[in-house]
Image (cartoon, rainbow, N blue to C red):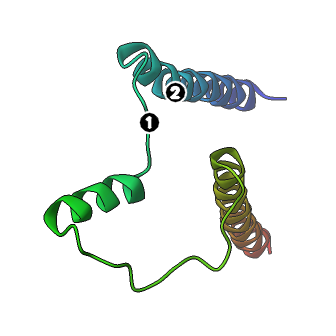
Amino acid sequence: MTTHETKKKGNSTKLTVILMLLVLAIVIVPQVIKSGAEFGGSDDQAESVITEMDPNYKPWFSSIFEPASGEIESLLFASQAALGAGIVGYYIGTTRTKHKMKEEK
């Protein structure tokens, strides 16, 4: 390994550590600042505002599937997000690999 490659790897490691610390800060700081706060979804807040504005409002659509609890609903939402992130990550990875292979030729 050359010194250039070693420096590049060291910079990459430092960047990874900094990004990990930033992610932890983004997760922990709101919990500390707003300890005891209830973090609800925007759909619940929208429903309460609509009910305040028009108490006689009747929804024109109902869910096809209603999860048994809020925890299951959160699990399904997180699973959808993870699946989407996996698809996007796969696409980016394959695209980068194709570009690298073209450059090597």
Question: Which residue is drawn at the image coordinates 68% and 44% (left, top)?
Answer: 71
Residue of label 2: 27
Question: Left or right: 87 with respect to 18?
Answer: right
Up-down: is 69 above or below 103? Answer: above
Residue 62 in percent (x, y) is at: 52, 79
Q: Nearer the viewer, residue 53 or 20?
A: 53
- Residue sitting nearer the eye, 41 or 23: 41
Pointer 2 local density, CA inside 10 Å: few below 14, some 14–19, many at least 20: few
Q: Secondary structure at mark 1?
A: loop
Q: Secondary structure at mark 2?
A: helix
Q: Amino acid at mark 1?
A: Phe
Task: Give the amino acid type for the residue marked by disc 2 in the picture.
Answer: Val
Label number found at residue 95: none
**Tags 1 and 2 touching, CB below 8 Å:** no
Quadrant where the N terminus sits is top right
Residue 11 location (% of width, % of height): 61, 26
Where is residue 20, by image quadrant?
Answer: top right
Disc 1 vs disc 2: which is toward the camera? 1
Q: CA distance from mark 1 to mark 2?
A: 13 Å
Residue positioned 65% across, 31% down in the render? 12
Q: Report which residue position mark 1 lands on.
A: 39
